């Protein structure tokens, strides 16, 4: 029987059907509004949204052999091995039938970026970065109330540290390639979406 994270294509190093897909990576600190704004984009533009964190949480619930390991890494705010996350993303893209994707919370580190490049062989069209001060992120997460195990002050501090140490260098990398689109996320959700809407209208 196929395990939930088996790659749809048995050649683990190729996802040829997706070579022509448009991918937008969506990055930002924990609680910066990535999920909220991706949901808005989907309503106005023909993208399919995948959150790497949501796919990992679904993998835990599915009873996967990796579930316990993923759960303990999320509880610690650590980044799950990229082979797992990339397989989940590839499977989700394959099954969606669409060819335009918002990939939220990915790539989180250099390993995520390299494995995705090697497996999916897709360069992002651009990378959206929701920029927001830590104090505001903390306030938003502490009042999110979605029952997430990692939404507690101890894990939030660890997630901030991982963001600064591992994800900000990825953001700088895309900036150096001219691919970064930075949005001031410290405004109301409506104001942030207006900036996002204008960007998508001009980019796609
Ligand atoms: N611009 C905003 N102003 C105030 N609150 C917001 C704003 N955008 C989102 N929120 C709220 O902040 C919380 C975090 O938002 P969201 O879940 O979209 O962030 P995220 O970047 O996906 O976080 P994570 O990385 O933890 O998954 C939610 O409760 C959401 O309703
Ligand atoms: N590329 C990723 C994305 C997420 N994770 C793990 O999931 C946690 C929650 O992610 P959110 O985007 O939903 O906040 C995150 O803290 C990581 O533990 C990951 O490993 N790799
Ligand atoms: Mg999210």
Image (cartoon, rainbow, N blue to C red):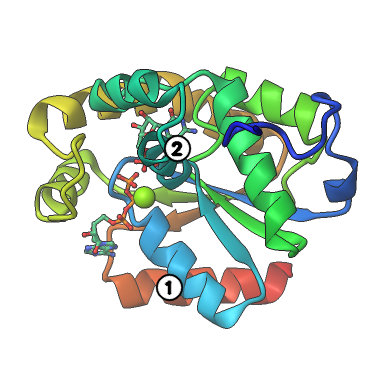
Q: Which mark is residue 193?
A: 1
Quadrant of ligand 1: it is bottom left
Which residue, as the protein is rendered here, is positioned at the far front? 1
Residue at x 65%, y 33% (from the top left corner): 2
Return the x and y of residue 4 as percentages of the image width and height: 57, 36
Residue at x 16%, y 49% (from the top left corner): 147
Q: Measure the alpha-carbon separation of dots 1 and 2.
A: 30 Å
Answer whether labels 1 and 2 touch (C-beta < 8 Å).
no
Q: Which residue is mark 2?
A: 59
Q: Secondary structure at mark 2?
A: helix
> 101 and 31: which one is in front?
101
> 156 and 92: which one is in front?
92
**Position of 43 relative to 141 (above/below):** below
Residue at x 22%, y 39% (from the top left corner): 134
Q: Is residue 50 visible?
A: yes
Q: Secondary structure at mark 1?
A: helix
């Amino acid at each position: 029987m196929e395990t939930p994270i088996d790659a749809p294509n048995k050649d683990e190093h190729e996802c040829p059907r997706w070579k022509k897909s448009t991918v937008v990576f969506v990055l930002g600190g924990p609680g910066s509004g990535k999920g909220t704004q991706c949901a808005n984009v989907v309503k106005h533009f023909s993208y399919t949204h995948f959150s790497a964190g949501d796919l990992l949480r679904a993998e835990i619930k599915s009873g996967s052999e990796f579930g316990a390991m993923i759960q303990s890494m999320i509880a610690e705010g650590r980044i799950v091995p990229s082979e797992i996350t990339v397989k989940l993303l590839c499977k989700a893209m394959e099954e969606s039938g669409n060819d335009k994707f918002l990939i939220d919370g990915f790539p989180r580190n250099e390993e995520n970026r390299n494995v995705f490049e090697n497996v999916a062989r897709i360069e992002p069209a651009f990378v959206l970065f929701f920029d927001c001060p830590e104090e505001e992120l903390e306030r938003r997460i502490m009042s999110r109330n979605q029952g997430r195990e990692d939404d507690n002050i101890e894990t939030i501090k660890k997630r901030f540290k991982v963001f600064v140490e591992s994800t900000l260098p990825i953001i700088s990398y895309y900036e150096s390639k001219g691919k970064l689109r930075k949005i001031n996320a410290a405004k109301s959700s409506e104001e942030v979406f207006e900036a996002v809407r204008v960007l998508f209208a001009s980019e796609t």
